[in-house]
Structure formats: C-alpha cells, structure tokens
C-alpha cells in the first residue's frame, strides 16, 4: 500500500472492508425486516459469488466497489434512523468518508459517487449537516492530491493522465471494443438460472431501496457507453444489486413461519453456492499460471523463474505477487529466441505443455491445464535482472498497440 507494510497487513485491511459489507447489510436488513432481513442480507452478502470471489478483481475496482457499498449502506441506515425519529449524523459521516475513498480508489466511479452525495444531501434538512458531509468526503480526495504531488509532482496526475490517455487518446479501445449489451450478457452468462429469480427479487426490493437500485443501474449504464468493457469495471454495482435483491427476499421471508424461514435461508445459501459454479470454473482457469509460479518460488534451488507464454497473457501471471517469501527474479518472454539466449538467468520455466518442443527441460515439476512448470537447470549464472519483467511487458504492449504480431507460443 506504499507504506512499507507487510503483505499480511494489506490483506487484513482489504479483508476488513469486505467483511464490513456483511455487517452493514445485515444491520440494514434487520432495521427494515427484523431477524429475517438481518439473516437474509447477511447470508447473501457473505455467499453471493460476485462479493465472495474477489481474487479475480484488481484491487482498485474490487475495493472501490466495497467502499461504495459501505457508503450507501451507511447512508440508508442513517435514513432509517431519521425516519424513526433518532437523528444521528454518524452513519452519514461514515458514508461521506467511504464516498471519498471510492473516488480515490477508482475515479471512474465519480458519477455514481456524485449521485450518492446528492441523494444524501437531499435527505439532510440542515445546511450545517450538509456542509459537514461534503467536507468530510473531500478529506480522502485531498489526501490523494498530496500523495500525487509527492510521488508524481503535479495536480492529480494519476487521474488526469489516465483520463487523457483513455478518453482523448482512445488507448483503451486498443484493448477491445465491446457492444452496448456486453455487461448484461456477461451477468447472465455468470449467473445463469439464478438471473431470473434475481431480477424478480430486485424489482420487489426496489420499494424499500431506491437508492442502491438506481445507483447500481446507473453504474452499469454509463459503463456500457464506454467502448472498452471488462466485467470487473462494473463490480461496484454488484453489492448494490445484491442488497436490493436481498431486501426483496427479506420481504417474502418475513411472512414465513420459523421452520419455513429456516428452510428458505438454507435454500438461499444453496442457490448462492450453485450460482458460483461458473465463477469457480473461471477462477480455476485464470489461477493456473499464478499457482505454478508460486510453486516455483517454493523450490529450494530456485534462483530465477521465466514465463514463456503469449504476449497478451502477461496479466494472468500475477507478477511478483506470487514471490512473497523469497528474493527471486521473474522473467517474461513471448519470443523463443529471447528465452533461449537468456537461459543462464533462470532454472525454472512456466510455459505451455509444448515447451519441450522449443526448449530444454530436465523434467516437468507440475502441470495445470495447458501449463506446466519445468526445471531447466541446476543453478543460474549472471546477475539477476529484476526490471526485465516490466521492460518486456512494455515492449509487448507497444507492439500490440502498433499492430505488430509478436511470436506466440501455441498450446
């Protein structure tokens, strides 16, 4: 996180953000529908696959979605306290902090954050309270400006440069242009049979949860207007949609007898697990290379690990994130000539099963799907190059953007 903290501390912060969603959703469900609402919203937040499986999301997208969900959940809790005659500004202040953090983590969610802020300000009758909320939300944003100034030396360059490159230079289009309906199609393909039931519950839950329903829908809509689309871009909408559907289900379960209610909760948990099956298959596919890299880093004689895969697959490696315990250089290659000329720098290779056709391997240590971990030498010679991975990624991306077709290793 840029503070010199150990990996465990970073994971702990992210875990707290994720688990907090369960607590906030359960609290809101309990306020609206009693025990039925608390259990239903808590179980859905804990078991719905989009919220449960975060490893496939980049940190900014996933955690910004969590902070936005916490912000809206706290805002709705504050609203319920208002309606009960118990005015309390603390939930709204917490909402403001998380709204600011959302912009810091992913500025692309700024339109959704702005709409959320307007919604909260509309609920607050006093201008003093409104001013406190606005100023509180600006604190994380101002902190980002200070950090940007210290690291990049300018006025919010991390945001401005990203916006300029992707919007005015249209660099994002080089990564693919998808149709307007891409996100809806993706959601249906992942949720499958659960989609229709989810839509029914979502519509039913909108009666008591217009705020998350509208904001979640808006996030999907305006991201659909952007040419380049990735499912992780709309993760922030998922917790909000799940909250609305959970409240819709709570309104049904509230009317059931205790035994029927317990059975219904079991069905909800089962449906969440069943809906996760497409996610599990996808996660297994994208985790194969990182798993092999981790295994390579655990080999006692490992002194250098090379990855020989397609030039557009470098993002699936996880980079140095798998090398948390040992000081081992990681090399990335997509050209067979390059990897053969640098064979003295590594003694393990992660590549396709066809690697034996182009390189020397003492033996295969392990295989997962199309990929295998090979041992190629007993030791390494020459100075390690810890910047090679970054240089090769830059080279591959430049070639792809310019339309060149670099050599690929075929499975």
Image (cartoon, rainbow, N blue to C red):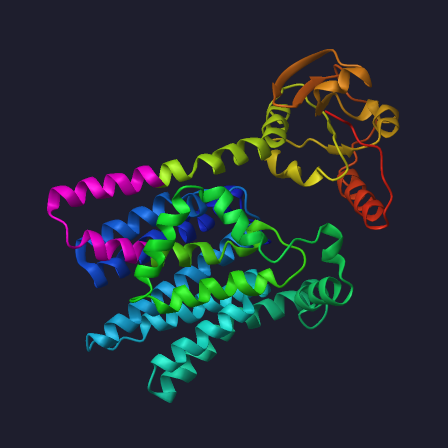
User: Could you tell me which quadrant the C terminus lies in?
Assistant: top right
Q: Nearer the viewer, residue 339 or 201?
A: 201
Q: Where residue 161 sits in the image (x, y, percent)?
A: 72, 65
Q: Is residue 263 magenta?
A: yes
Q: Tell me the quarter of the picture where residue 399 sits.
A: top right
Toward the top, the furthest residue is 362
Front-most of residues 65 and 188: 188
Q: Which residues are magenta?
A: 245-271
**Is 325 in the magenta?**
no
The location of residue 36, given as percent across then percent down, is 20, 52
Tally of numbered tags? 0
The answer to whether residue 214 is above or below residue 254 is below
What residue lies at 40% left-to-right and 61% top-to-bottom? 70
- Whether 288 is drawn above or below 99: the answer is above
In terms of image quadrants, where is residue 106? bottom right
**Residue found 67% across the figure and 55% down from its top:** 228
Q: In the depicted view, which residue is nearer to us: 317 or 243?
A: 243
Q: Residue at x 45, y 54 (%)?
A: 238
Residue lying farthest bottom? 127
Q: Is residue 252 above or below residue 359?
A: below
Q: Is residue 107 above or below residue 394?
A: below
* In the displayed structure image, the side of residue 98 where residue 57 appears, left or right: right
Left or right, 106 with respect to 164, comes to left
- x and y, in percent, of residue 352 in the image: 71, 23
């Amino acid at each position: 996180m840029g503070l010199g903290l150990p990996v465990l501390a970073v994971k702990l912060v992210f875990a707290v953000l994720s688990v907090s969603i369960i607590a906030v959703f359960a609290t809101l469900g309990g306020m609206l529908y009693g025990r039925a609402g608390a259990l239903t919203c808590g179980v859905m937040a804990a078991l719905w696959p989009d919220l449960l499986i975060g490893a496939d999301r980049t940190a900014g997208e996933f955690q910004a979605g969590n902070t936005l969900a916490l912000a809206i959940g706290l805002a709705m809790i504050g609203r319920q306290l208002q309606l009960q005659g118990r005015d309390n500004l603390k939930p709204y202040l917490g909402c403001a902090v998380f709204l600011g953090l959302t912009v810091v983590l992913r500025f692309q969610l700024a339109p959704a954050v702005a709409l959320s802020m307007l919604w909260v300000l509309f609920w607050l009758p006093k201008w003093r309270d409104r001013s406190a909320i606005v100023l509180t939300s600006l604190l994380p944003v101002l902190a980002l400006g200070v950090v940007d100034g210290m690291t990049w030396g300018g006025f919010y360059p991390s945001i401005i440069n990203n916006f300029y490159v992707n919007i005015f230079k249209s660099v994002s289009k080089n990564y693919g242009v998808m149709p307007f309906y891409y996100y809806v199609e993706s959601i249906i393909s992942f949720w499958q049979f659960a989609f229709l039931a989810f839509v029914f519950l979502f519509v039913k839950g909108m009666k008591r949860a217009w705020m998350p329903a509208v904001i979640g829908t808006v996030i999907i809509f305006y991201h659909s207007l952007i040419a380049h689309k990735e499912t992780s871009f709309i993760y922030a909408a998922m917790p909000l949609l799940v909250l609305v559907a959970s409240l819709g289900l709570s309104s049904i379960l509230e009317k059931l007898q205790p035994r029927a209610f317990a059975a219904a909760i079991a069905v909800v948990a089962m449906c969440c697990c069943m809906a996760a099956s497409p996610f599990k298959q996808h996660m297994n596919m994208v985790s194969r290379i990182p798993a092999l890299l981790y295994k390579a880093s655990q080999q006692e004689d490992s002194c250098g690990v090379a990855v020989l895969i397609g030039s557009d697959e470098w993002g699936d490696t996880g980079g140095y994130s798998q090398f948390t315990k040992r000081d081992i250089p990681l090399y990335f290659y997509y050209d067979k000539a390059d990897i053969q000329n640098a064979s003295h720098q590594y003694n393990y290779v992660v590549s396709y099963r066809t690697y034996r056709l182009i390189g020397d391997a003492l033996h295969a240590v392990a295989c997962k799907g199309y990929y295998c971990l090979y041992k190629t030498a007993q030791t390494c010679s020459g100075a390690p190059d810890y910047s090679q991975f970054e240089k090769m990624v830059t080279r591959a991306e430049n070639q792809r953007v310019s339309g060149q077709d670099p050599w690929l290793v075929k499975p």
